[in-house]
Image (cartoon, rainbow, N blue to C red):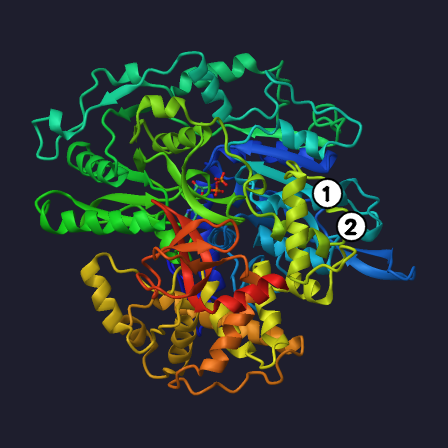
Amino acid sequence: ARSQKLTSNGKHNTTQERPNLQHLRKVATQLEKSRKDLPIWAKKIDIRWALRHNDVLLLNGETGSGKSTQVPQFLCTEPWCKKQIVKVEDRNGNEETIPIGGMIVITQPRRVAAITLAHRVAREMGSPLIKGASGEVGYSVRFDTVVPLGAKIKFVTEGMLLQEMLHDPNLRKYSAVIVDEIHERSVDVDLLAGFLRQIIHGDKKGRGGIPLKLIVMSATLDLGGIEAFFAKPGTQPTYQPGNNHGKVLAAHLLELEVEGAVESGQWRPSSDESSSSWGGISNSGDEGNHSIYSMPRHEEKKCASESQPKPLPKGDFPRSEAYYGVSENGVAVEYVRGRQHEVNIFYEVNPAPDYLHNALQTILQLHVKEPLPGDILAFLSGQEEIETLQTQLEGYAENIVKTLPRMKVMPLHGSLPAQAQQDVFERVKEPFTRKIVLATNIAETSVTVSGVRFVVDCGKAKVKQYRPRLGMESLLAKPISRVSAIQRAGRAGREAKGKCFRIYTEQDYLQLEQDDLPEILRSDVIEAVLKMKARGVIDVLSFPLMDSPNIVAMEKALLQLHMMGALDDSGNLTTAGIKMASYPLPAALGRVLIAATELDSDVLLEVIDIISCLTTDSEIFLQPKSEEERDDTEIARHDILDRRGDILTLLNTMRRYAAENADRTGWCRQHLVSVRAMKMALAIRKQLRQLCFQQKLLKFSPPPDPVAVESIAPERAEYILKAFLKAFSTRTALLAPDGTYMTTIGRNTIAIHPSSVLYGKRVEAIIFLDHVFTTKSYARKVSVVQADWITRALEY
Ligand code: ADP
């Protein structure tokens, strides 16, 4: 059997060996001490007892306090967490005997977090993480599930749990659901919260009367609203502004600022400084004067605002019932204090128009001037910026500062493989002296980077935003909220006193919004509406959500789904709609898959190949960094580039890659294609083919592969593009007389993105699958279509 070997440094190697249980136990014993040092351990009994008496627990704790790794372990041995055999009524009113519970499922906003956490917890428990073997911990994310036999703890993405609910609306396998990182407020977590609330307050007949425990965990959110959401109907939340229940660290820090405890340092950029070739950070005198995160102050503040804390009874179990009684509204609240040292804040005085320039300067200055040890964590807006800065920093490290201590530059974003994310937990080793982690907001609360003393914050993050004028979503780099800025700064003070350099002015900071808008209020709600419909919600407009999108947006989504053929005239899901909701794909791509079999000629295999390439975590094509490189890229990819656009180019890429039996890695390198993305695309392709076979859309499994070298015949290309038009008819544009493109809906100017094979080309009409807004409005994943195809698609 394939098994996983865990090396002493925590790397996961897949080998053919059987798990070495003795070694795994030894590793677990070694990790025990650091586990027990985590702040959450002081709350172990409180957490257990709170859940013995209540079904819902809101747990608030600083990032790194141990919530995600420890809480499932605290709970999986609890008496309520056992499989029970009960009688329930099936749909036809017949009694059946079924098992309920026994497992804990814990949700994560990102797939890579689910995988890394599962590995970490498995290591801590000394348990192998291998499909088919016995083990305590598993994970399940889109296109990748490893759940050992008898697993008690399962890490999943929010989307996966929603998907499970399609088949098991009462979550019968589970005794408890832990919703982690709820403050990120993705659309999926908001939907989950709505469904979980229904289970918790429902009649529980579907679970044979056995309650489902719910633990909601967060690092930054003011939990007052969430407590009210889960409170028993007709009761009051215990949260009151000013009492400590549900108040969080970030809020405390905000209070401190509001009260004027902030004194910012000022950082002058390089030109003012003569002592270093990089310029320097102005010495702001006595560091103590510039503290905003003074732990003692924070502590004092917190205690003062606490409403008459009850004295803790001595000893271990059992605590008195009176202390941990049933909360009147059914919701218990616990707060875990993290470790937070003082952090000095410095603002940029002269921000450059290109913040990357400031970031580069700041990082180099810090590296040159600040004492060791002390790693640097820089928050940038997205993967592209991270890659650009990484190249620049590595260039400097190689060429200019050879004589200086070596720095190790590491990217950290959601599209990295689990192993690369694992590396940020490690301390730097010789010959490196300092690690420089370039991260997206993933490092704000979701991943704890060790050793950080310096934070560089660009003040921006890429967010999905629905743009009603365009009728579509686009990715925008937007200013972060104050809560985020404070979280980011806090990352510098986890292990010792730290410094945070904000690459924006204090004035900019003061103008930031207090909090982020939940995704459901700023995104296209089509996915949310489809998911609700698929789970039997008849009236989606009155489904309980923590924040409801406005009715116009919901109605528009219903209309769009109707246009796609997912809903019938009475608003019920059609067979196509049911299929779309069951695919592990965005609704529109699900629609394309179905369309591929509806046209006169079946182009399903081709469409599966393309969709597989479109749904990988990271981009298939490595992007050229300069115009010169762009020419090289075109030469390197000459045999896969299709002048008809990116959709067919992706198809060529998948076909050639799949046909390449000898050296796929070499092939990817030669074509400047991401090896990892292609591996993932191939795995997705396999699963989508299986799924289509199960649904009888495909006749063979595996289907015979077409000859790769042939170019795609014009009539097949037409059907493929028409299948995409069925779902993306609103993402089309026509060439205007002045050479620009105008969207068919909304009549907005749009340009073809440099990443497209059609960049700089003029064609009659285009379809595009993605839209980004940077300096202007860009269409990405673009293909040539005919204007009359669009007209017909829009009529439909
Ligand atoms: P929280 O959920 O409160 O943010 P976690 O339970 O994720 O905290 O992490 C607790 C501690 O365990 C952190 O200090 C982190 O450094 C460590 N840790 C978590 N995951 C890993 C991992 N995969 N490898 C090494 N250390 C880890």
* Residue highlighted by disc 2: 538
- The residue nearer to you, when weighing 60 against 488, is 488
- Position of 400 relative to 136 (above/below): above
Residue visible at 31% across and 26% down in the picture: 497
Camera sees residue 3: no
Give, as a three-letter code, the residue at label 2: Ile
Q: Residue at x 52, y 32 (%)?
A: 61
The circle on residue 276 is none
Disc 2, disc 1: CB below 8 Å?
A: no
Instruction: Say what amino acid the circle numbered 1 marks.
Output: Leu
Name the image quarter holding residue 543: top right
Picture residue at 53% right of the left edge, 35% below the top: 517
Q: Residue furthest front?
A: 737
User: Number of numbered discs present?
Assistant: 2
The Cα–Cα distance between marks 2 and 1, rounded to whole angstroms, is: 9 Å
Q: In which quarter of the image is residue 541?
A: top right
- Residue bearing mark 1: 541
Q: Where is residue 469 in the image (x, y as percent from the top left)?
A: 52, 44
Lateral position of residue 721 relative to residue 296, left or right: right
